[in-house]
Amino acid sequence: LGLMGGGPPAPPPAQSAGGGSLLGAPAAQSPQYMALCLRNDGVLFEDATLQIGIKMEFNGHQGRMAVYFGNKCPAPLMSFGTQLSPCAALAIQASPVAATLNPRSQQQLLLNIECLDAFGEGPQLAVRFMGGSTPQPLVVPLPIIATKFVAPLRVEGADFFRRWKTLDGKEQQQIFKLTAMPLAEALVERVVGAGL
């Protein structure tokens, strides 16, 4: 059934080659998105018209992200606009973007991010523009994940062992058997490719 309980479920949204969705629903996490979950800069989306690059930094519960939009066409992209999906656990302030993205040029969207609470899925960015006379909507998930707000705790050796001893008797261990022996090659490549 559909979301409202009537009729068949909606078909999945059309995907662009760069990992974004063309019909307003988010795409499955692309390799570019997954890479940006581990790094702080890189390309999030790219097709023949538009390139979206990310540069970000985090310090404790706050972060800054610059989203770069590059027009790869010989014609300007008109009625250019962006919109963030709401995420209650994050306070995000966004700078405005110009309504026209000139040919072979770039503009940026600056985001100031504050993590207010634990969260699962991060926000998505909807990008809309006129390519010729046709509106071009695109939705991409932003690589804002909870672990970006984690800061290392530095402790001296004596303090570490004092804290460790407070956990004595509270540890939990579980042994389980793998379902496939040896691990499937595709799974091994995925884990190694993710840098784990």
Image: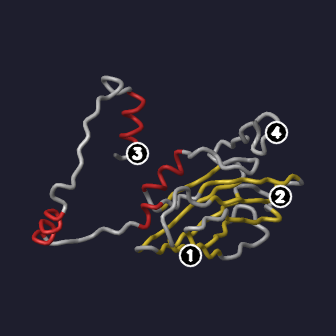
* Spot occupied by residue 154 in the image (x, y as percentages of width and height): 23, 71
Front-most of 25 and 30? Answer: 25
In this rendering, the label closer to the viewer, 2 or 3? 3
Estimate the spatial distance between the alpha carbons at disc 1 and disc 4, rounded to whole Å: 40 Å
* Spot occupied by residue 77 in the image (x, y as percentages of width and height): 79, 61
Q: Which residue is mark 4?
A: 6
Q: Secondary structure at mark 4?
A: loop
Mark 1 is surrounded, within 10 Å at the Cα level, by few (under 14), some (14 to 19) or many (20 or more) other residues, namely some
- The quarter of the picture where residue 158 lies is bottom left
Q: Quadrant of the N terminus?
A: top right
Estimate the spatial distance between the alpha carbons at disc 1 and disc 3, rounded to whole Å: 27 Å
In this rendering, the label closer to the viewer, 1 or 4? 4
Q: Residue at x 38, y 26 (%)?
A: 184
Q: Secondary structure at mark 1?
A: strand
Q: For the residue marked with disc 3, what is the amino acid?
A: Ala
Residue 130 badge: 2
Q: Is residue 179 above or below residue 149?
A: above
